[in-house]
Amino acid sequence: MVAGDIIFIRAQEGNIIGRIQAVKDAPVAEGEAKPFIERGLLGEKRKAAAEAEMKSLRSTAKVVFLDDKYKLDAAAAPTVEKPAEATKPEAAAKPASSHIEKGLSGL
């Protein structure tokens, strides 16, 4: 935090909004700092362990539908469509009337 930052504190009777006026370095004795450092290191270890566990769970996860109405069959599975091919120069050179005649011939 730097001077000028706004902080919000939730209290029993409501919320407190404050603004940091100044920041001063305050040396702390090693004995006083040790519990804070240990807590920070323990928090980092817990976070790393939780992330590793989540990664492991995601890699081995399997979705099982208990209700048949939510199962996807092969026909209903989403498909990836290929983008339309660009118009070839030969097709662009044909007169528009030939395209219209071809379309009308199917009627």
Image: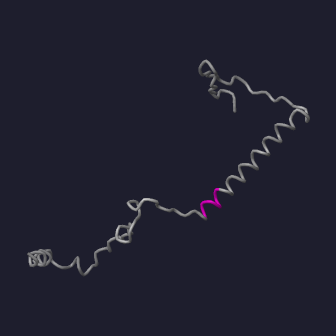
Residue 14 percent coordinates (x, y): 59, 20
User: What colour scheme governs how the chains and residues are painted in the rendered image of this protein?
Assistant: one colour
Indicate the quadrant where residue 3 lies: top right
The magenta segment: 54-59
Q: How many marks?
A: 0
In the shown orientation, is residue 36 left or right of residue 6? right
For the point 12% across and 74% down, the residue is 100
Does the magenta portion include 51? no
Quadrant of the rendering where the C terminus is positioned: bottom left
For the point 36% across and 70% down, the residue is 81
Does the magenta portion include 58? yes
Quadrant of the rendering where the N terminus is positioned: top right
Q: Above or below — where is 82 with respect to 44?
A: below
Nearer the observer, 88 or 66: 66
Nearer the observer, 95 or 76: 76
Residue 26 percent coordinates (x, y): 83, 28
Q: Above or below — where is 30 with respect to 24?
A: below
